[in-house]
Every structure is written in structure tokens, then in C-alpha cells.
Amino acid sequence: MGSAWVVSLTTDYGLGDGFVAACHGAIARIAPTVRVFDVTHLVPPGDIRRGATVLAQTVPHLPVGVHVAVVDPGVGTARRGVALATPQGFLVGPDNGLLLDAADALGGVRAAAELSNPEWLASRVSATFHGRDVFAPVAARLATGAPLAEAGPAVDPATLVRLPEPVVEVRPGGFTAEVLTVDHFGNVQLAAPADLLAPLPARVRVGPPGERDPIEAVHGRTFGDAPVGALVAHADSADLVALSVNGGRAVDLLAAHPGTLLRVDGSATVGADPGPHA
């Protein structure tokens, strides 16, 4: 697949310790000319869903390379470390559901291997720091052209761990969807594809299913389509439905968090235009 690719890192390690630098160092010792991208190291600790979402929505925009992800509350247990080959590069990390959405975004898993070849790992592997001792060394070798088959025995892609599908329920006049993630700005991203929002009117109501007093939102294209402090429902940069507040934080207004179910309703909305939003 080529050599001297980039390596990207996505973790929940934070920035207050030396964990990230140690991973950079492990890569540089093996592949000093490989360029390393830091996607983020601020995934909430142990939040596999958030890590998987960030990874899947970022890797299609990076150069072809090796993408390491470490959100790994099961480090040191029987969970496998794996490397996945896709049409647009490799993914390396724990087999805990973190990698497969990103693999889908890169064209699907063509081959997979369990990371068990001791020659590909650090000479001493810590039970609690596989990012440094397993995943970074493997990524460095893949980035310089070493074949995946040497990393360890082949894994049947059908046996890889996949996170449960988030809830999306469509009905006439609207839909209910699970909050997939909340970003740095407090924007609430739903698991619903943006085309579910497109036919709804210029005003919608948003709230938990069964909520008697949902919040009215502008159905807009961007934040400024709503008055300052008001809620706007829009398609985000990942082509999913997002809820934002112009100049504020939708997560606070909606009291939502990842996993919350929110109903977006375009029917019987006070003040709504009778026709679809243009």
C-alpha cells in the first residue's frame, strides 16, 4: 500500500501528562520521517462512542495513512488489539467498537489482524499503556510499508466488535433520534441523517419524546439563521442533523447528553410556515 504515510492519533489521554508525547516518540523511533497528526486527545475518558464518532467524521479528510485510536477502558484484558486494512489506509486500536465506523467511512474492512507479533511491539509491553507499546509501534511499521499479515494472525472482520446502532425513528412530520455527540461549542449532533430534516417546515419543535412543552427552533442553514440566543436545527458538516444556539450552547438549553433521545417535530407547530423549508 505504499510507505512513509502519515499517522494520526485520536485518544482520551488528555494533555496534562506525557502519554501523547510517548506515543509520538514510539512512532519516531521506528519511522522518524513519518508525519503525525493529532486529531484530538480530549475525548472524555473511556467514552468509546465519542471517540468513534470523532474518528469516523475526521479520517475521510486526512491524507491516506494509518489512523491510531485509543479509547480503551479494557486495556490489558482479553479484548484484542487489531489493525484493519481499508481501501484508504489502516486503522489501529482496541477491538471495542472504536474503529468500525471509521472503517466504514474509509470504504470498509478489507482485512484485519490481531496484534500479537512480539517483533512489532515494544520490548516490554505495559498492561496499562498499549497506546505506546502496541498501537504506536504497529502504526509506525505499517506507515513504512510493512505488510499487515506480519502483525499477527488474520481476524475475520465479521467478529470485530461494533457499537450498537444509535436510535433513529422516523414518523410522519418528524423523527426521534439519539444524541450522538456534543462538540466543544455545545452543538448537539443527532444520529439522524440531514435529509430527515430537509422536508420539515421553517419552524420545528425539539424536546424529549413525550415532552409537553418542547422548544421551538428555526429550521435553518447555519447558526445566524436564528435570532441570538435562539435554537436552530440544521444540517452539520457531517450531513447529520444538529441543534445549535446562535451565540449560546444548545446542550445547556436542551439539557441533553450523548444517548439522550430528542424528538424533532414539524407538525402542528405554532407559527410554522405551511410549506416546506426552502
Image (spheres, rainbow, N blue to C red):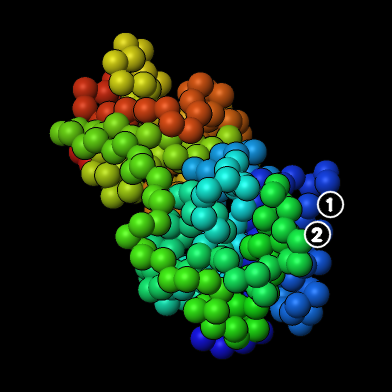
Front residue (pair 214, 101): 101
Compared across the picture, whether 139 is left or right of 213 comes to right
Residue type, numbered disc 1: Gly
Front residue (pair 59, 140): 140
In this rendering, the answer to whether 109 lies above or below 174 is: below
Circles 1 and 2 in contact, beta carbons < 8 Å: yes
At horizontal 80% and vertical 75% (from top left) the residue drawn is 29
Residue 103, can we see it? Answer: yes
Residue 33 horizontal/vertical position (percent): 76, 82
At horizontal 31% and vertical 36% (from top left) the residue drawn is 167
Residue 124 horizontal/vertical position (percent): 76, 61
Which secondary structure lies at badge 1?
A: loop
Q: Hey, which residue is sitting farthest left in the picture?
A: 172
Front residue (pair 17, 26): 26
Residue 196 horizontal/vertical position (percent): 27, 44
Compared across the picture, whether 261 is left or right of 63 comes to left
In this rendering, the answer to whether 52 lies above or below 242 is: below
Residue 173 horizontal/vertical position (percent): 19, 33
Mark 1, Cα crowd under 10 Å, few <14 / some 14-19 / many 20+, is few
At horizontal 60% and vertical 41% (from top left) the residue drawn is 73
Residue type, numbered disc 2: Ala
At horizontal 57% and vertical 66% (from top left) the residue drawn is 116
As drawn, the label of residue 18 is 1
Residue receiving disc 2: 22
As drawn, the label of residue 172 is none
